[in-house]
């Protein structure tokens, strides 16, 4: 019995992929707190750009400039590389809570220098700025509007404006600290 010859038509596969308009679900787009943008992939398809970081969304909206973004991003990288992010806790099968007793010690020279730079930057900030830095820049759990509400503003517009002003001041302090002018 002769087998039928298999034909692979790449043009047909490409046309089928071009007609696939699924993209992210409505639920996923609803969770994009900093917005999203639909672009073109130059091949007849769509590309979705979803903003996940608040400072990236602020840069895109031109609320901060490139140097301020670079300073805030450098602050975030020092925090991350110093291993201050915390860890994922797993379920212990013996049901014993046993944290690492040496967790506060630095594992390497690189981690020590990142922790030193992070602490230098943290010393420059005021108390409220430290709270905004930890929630908006580092852990990225709050938006600028939520930070403005924490500053005491009730209007969403004024809350965003006040938070952006504070974030710009923080970024300028970091620029001066690290000589990024």
Image: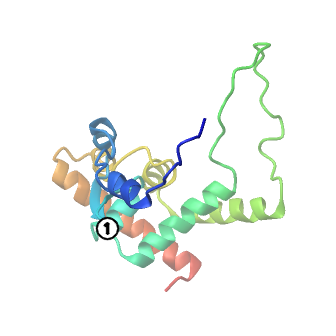
- Where is residue 114 shown, x and y percent of the image? 70, 63
Image position of 77 (left or right of 165) = right
Q: Is residue 98 above or below residue 123?
A: above
In the displayed orientation, state which residue is furthest to the bottom: 181
Q: Is residue 174 above or below residue 100?
A: below
Image position of 52 (left or right of 87) = left
- Where is residue 180 shown, x and y percent of the image? 53, 82
Q: Which of the 4 image quadrants contains residue 141?
A: top left
Q: Quadrant of the N terminus?
A: top right
Residue at x 25% of width, y 55% of height: 160
- Where is residue 50 shown, x and y percent of the image? 36, 54
Residue underneath mark 1: 60
Q: Which of the 4 image quadrants contains residue 171?
A: bottom left
Image position of 2 (left or right of 51) = right
Residue at x 42% of width, y 55% of height: 53
| 10 Å crowding of disc 1: few (<14), some (14-19), many (20+) | few
Secondary structure beneath label 1: helix
């Amino acid at each position: 019995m002769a087998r039928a010859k298999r034909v692979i038509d790449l043009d047909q596969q490409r046309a089928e992929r071009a007609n696939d308009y699924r993209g992210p679900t409505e639920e996923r787009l609803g969770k994009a707190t900093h917005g999203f943008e639909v672009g073109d992939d130059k091949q007849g398809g769509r590309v979705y750009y979803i903003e996940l970081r608040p400072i990236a969304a602020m840069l895109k909206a031109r609320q901060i400039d490139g140097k301020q973004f670079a300073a805030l991003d450098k602050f975030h990288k020092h925090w991350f590389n110093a291993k201050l992010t915390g860890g994922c806790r797993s379920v212990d099968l013996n049901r014993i809570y046993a944290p690492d007793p040496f967790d506060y010690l630095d594992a390497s020279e690189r981690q020590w220098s990142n922790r030193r730079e992070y602490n230098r930057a943290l010393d420059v900030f005021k108390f409220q700025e430290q709270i905004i830095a930890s929630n908006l820049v580092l852990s990225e759990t709050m938006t600028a509007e939520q930070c403005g509400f924490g500053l005491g503003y009730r209007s969403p517009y004024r809350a965003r404006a006040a938070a952006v002003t504070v974030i710009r001041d923080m970024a300028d302090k970091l620029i001066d600290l690290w000589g990024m002018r």
